[in-house]
Image (spheres, grey):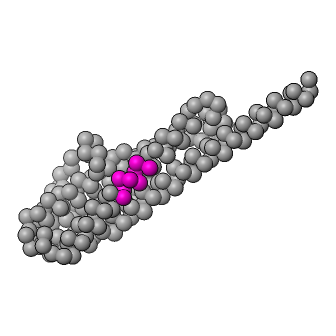
Amino acid sequence: MSTIVIFVAALILVAGVIIYNRLVGARNQVSTAWSDIDVQLQRRYDLIPRLVDAVDQYASYERATLEAVTVLRAEAMQVADVEARGEVEAKISSGLGRLIVLAESYPDLKANENFLNLQNELVETEDYLQFARRYYNGSVRDYNTLTETVPSNLLATWFGFDRSVYFQKTSDDAANVPLIDLGSVE
């Protein structure tokens, strides 16, 4: 009888270790995925001043749009919370879209090689950001599923594994992008 109890206890312990390790692995995958998003956001932040400068040379009287994008960039770089960062990123995406539309009004700018390269880099970065967001949200989904389903939820609660937040508001999520008045940002 004691052999059976020891065997069951060992089985429960092994199952607990396996579940705990899966939770840790899923949490680390979420962290890695967020790091990928952060790299792409930094790349976009680095492109914004160069793009603004290129447009600024041609459209100096459109200063409000240019300044708004710059202000939003600075704001986004200060936000650490995933949910709040998503909201700011949506505003940046909207502002960058308006910046590109503004550039359409200037044929010389549209033909400028530097601007075209910057625009292509921005499009490429937005694509990478979309892929990174999807990977991150998939990792969050898997992690949250582990923290909510039996029996892993018992260990998740006991060891303090909190739910992660989705990074939802991005340029390809147009239905959730809040409208902003770029003219009012100073």
* Image point (20%, 70%), residue name: 116
Most distant residue in the right direction: 2
* Image point (66%, 39%), residue name: 19
Q: Is 142 colored magenta in this rendering?
A: no
Judge left or right: residue 138 versus residue 93.
right
Most distant residue in the top direction: 1
Judge left or right: residue 103 versus residue 176.
left
Dominant secondary structure of the magenta stretch? Answer: helix
Q: Residue 45 placed where, x, y %?
A: 33, 65
**In this view, 57 is above or below 104:** below
Residue 185, by quadrant, is bottom left
Q: Is residue 87 something that shows in the picture?
A: no
Range covered by the magenta-colored residues: 128-135
Q: Quadrant of the N terminus?
A: top right
Q: Quadrant of the C terminus?
A: bottom left
Residue 110, by quadrant, is bottom left
Q: Residue 23 placed where, x, y %?
A: 61, 43
Q: How many marks?
A: 0
* Image point (45%, 58%), residue name: 36
Q: 47 or 75, which is in the foreground? A: 47
**In this view, 87 is above or below 48:** above
Residue 15, by quadrant, is top right
Q: Is residue 29 something that shows in the picture?
A: yes
Q: Is 130 colored magenta in this rendering?
A: yes
Judge left or right: residue 136 versus residue 62.
right
* Image point (36%, 49%), residue name: 86
Q: Residue 24 placed where, x, y %?
A: 62, 47
**In this view, 58 is above or below 81:** below
Q: Residue 72 placed where, x, y %?
A: 29, 59
